[in-house]
Image (tube, helix red, strand yellow):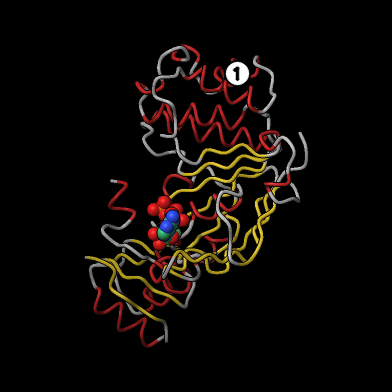
Amino acid sequence: MSASGIVVAGLRKRYGTTLALDGMSFTVRPGAVTGLVGPNGAGKSTTMRVILGLDAVDEGAALVAGKPYRSLKRPLSHVGSLLDAAALHPGRSGRDHLLWLAHSQSLAARRVDQVLAQVGLTSAARRKAGGYSLGMRQRLGLAAALLGDPPTIMLDEPFNGMDPDGMIWMRGFLRSLAAQGRAVLVSSHLMSEVQDTADHLVVVGRGRAIADAGVAELIAAASKNRVTLRTTAGTHAMRVLAQAGVTVAAAGRDTITVSGLPAGRIATLLGQSAVPFSEVSAHRATLEDVYLELTREAVEFRAATPAEVSQ
Ligand SMILES: Nc1ncnc2c1ncn2[C@@H]1O[C@H](COP(=O)(O)OP(=O)(O)OP(=O)(O)O)[C@@H](O)[C@H]1O
């Protein structure tokens, strides 16, 4: 494998009156899965098209293995991508689709059967791709991305149309690509899809990265000093805690969220004032919380929350 990784620096792109990219910058490192997540219209697909040289930018640059995509010799050996799983000739078999791609890039035909096996499509390989389910098309697209054994892989919404088994398979597969040392970039508009897969997250909103950090780091930052208190004496508890100068908010029936004091100190205060409680626990934010907080301001179209969509 050649050098891997993607560097995106200060991309700006306008479509008419729409500012699709507004200073998009991030890095995709080898040996890790980087999730590119954000609401619909945030600029994920545009960024990927720019990385592949399919769209020109007004400002900024995107480099793959240190070079603009268009100056790469044998690009499929540097970066494999899946942008649109529906972009197939429906009358051609999955295998013929890959053979045609391999031929166009002077890649050995035997790679076709190898990648078909890797993505679990061997038995369907000679069927017309037009009859494939979306999940099978995603697998075929992934096979195409792997043809040149590239050190960098970039997939736009690879979980779309996958059934639960397919999603588990895809997660494991992406992790194994990263474990082989490849740089893997995966986009999604659902945090739940990438939370068990990504090591690193670039959260995007309105054309720019609004967070760029390790998954553990993002969760720690969002969990900061928040404690969940369960009590049937809510009013009494809130009065005692407010006197201690902490911020309290009713979070649900019998549940209060407290910020500003560690859990142990809160338990002591409540005990001293004889306030009954059944639980005092440090809050651990989920990635979904992180995402909702970060993208609240950046949502362009809000028909349903990501949590609602994923139900
Ligand atoms: N070819 C185009 N012509 C006009 N506007 C476009 C074009 N492509 C993208 N846009 C606009 O640019 C913005 C970013 O779109 P993009 O498809 O990159 O977002 P996304 O994050 O991939 O969203 P989604 O999750 O819906 O795919 C949106 O406002 C979109 O409407």
Residue in the image at 48% along x and 46% along y:
194
* Quadrant location, ligand no. 1: bottom left
Residue in the image at 61% along x and 39% along y:
153
Q: Quadrant of the N terminus?
A: top right
Vertically, is 113 above or below 204? above
Vertically, is 1 above or below 186? above
The answer to whether 29 appears left or right of 264 in the picture is right
Question: What x and y, as percent, mark residue 167?
Answer: 43, 34
Callout 1 secondary element = helix
Question: What x and y, as percent, mark residue 10?
Answer: 63, 66
Q: Quadrant of residue 135?
A: top left
The answer to whether 267 appears left or right of 215 in the picture is left
Front in this rendered view, residue 94 or 259: 94
Confirm whether residue 252 shows in the render.
yes
Reading the image, the residue beneath label 1 is: 112
Confirm whether residue 286 shows in the render.
no
Amino acid type shown at disc 1:
Val
The answer to whether 22 appears left or right of 107 in the picture is left
